[in-house]
Image (cartoon, grey):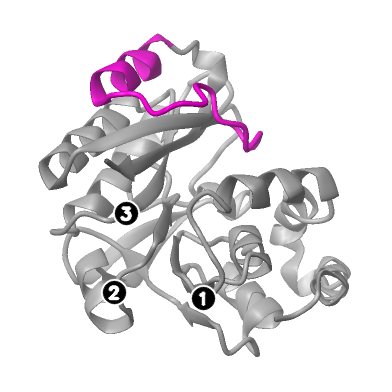
Amino acid sequence: MMSTHAIAARVAALRADPAFGSLHRSLAIYYGDPDREAAMDALYSRFLRPGALAFDIGAHVGDRIASFRRLGARVVALEPQPGPADVLQRLFGDDPNVTLLQSAVAAEEGRLILHINSANPTVSTASETFVRAAEGAGGWKGQVWDRQLEVMATTLDALIARHGCPAFVKIDVEGAEDAVLAGLSEPLAALSFEFTTIQREVALRCLDRLSVLGLYRYDIALGEGQRLTFGRPVSKQEMASHIMELPHSANSGDVYAVLA
């Protein structure tokens, strides 16, 4: 496993490289904060043990990959955008315990259209509805999806068939989380999916899909704080109510689901 110092050196090199200019902001946000990294490791250690398998769906610049590897997990990470995918190769491409796939994840295998936000690639999305929901919404001013890119898409079922059943799956795909879960036909031990307050209905559909697959209990972390809100497992109904009652300013976060 690559040391934290080695990853930091590679991140510094990327931040100094003008070829990755659109990702300098992401690299600055997601790397280099020891307190954030410690909180992330503490959170994911609830789900991952050394040698366990994790999927990172929507890996962006790979801060979750780094956390999973610090915990000793094996990782399959997917990122469809060429720029972030290149960053992942520069950071983790020589780690034999990390498999990098330049692909989206959807309800079906095939190809899909990715709406690219060139200035802020972290919110690029396969969901046209997400783009429309962001227009004029508070906290989303100035976000522009200025081009489209056709990308390959696989499914969670296909990934499991190829790589094995993961102990934990992180899903962060900007409004297409429900489509990712639609491509899953068996319950998983634990997973997380991102939600936003501009598309709360996506989170509700994710909860509905998980309830079909198995009996899950939930917790939630707002923003990038890596702190669970309840500190105890709650029901689907309690989680749905909590999401609907959040103020718009909460903006986003991650719902954590554990199979009961």
Q: Which amino acid does label 3 sit on?
A: Ala
SS at mark 2? helix
Q: Which mark is residue 159?
A: 2
Task: State the residue position of label 1.
Answer: 51
Q: In which quarter of the image is residue 12?
A: bottom right
Q: Would you place residue 197 above or below residue 206 in this image?
A: above
Residue position for label 3:
189
Residue 146 within the magenta-colored segment of the rendering: no
Precedes in sequence: disc 2 or disc 1: 1
Q: What element carries label 3?
A: loop
User: Which is more toward the observer, 238 or 77?
Assistant: 238
Q: In this view, does 81 lie above or below 232?
A: below
Dot 3 surroundings within 10 Å: few (below 14), some, or many (20 or more)? some
Question: Depth-wise, is mark 2 or mark 1 nearer the camera?
Answer: 1
The answer to whether mark 3 and mark 2 are in CB contact below 8 A is no
| Residue 155 vertical placement versus 91 (above, below) | above
Estimate the x, y position of residue 228 in percent, counting from the top left.
55, 30
In this rendering, is residue 109 above or below 43? below
Give the amino acid at mark 1: Gly
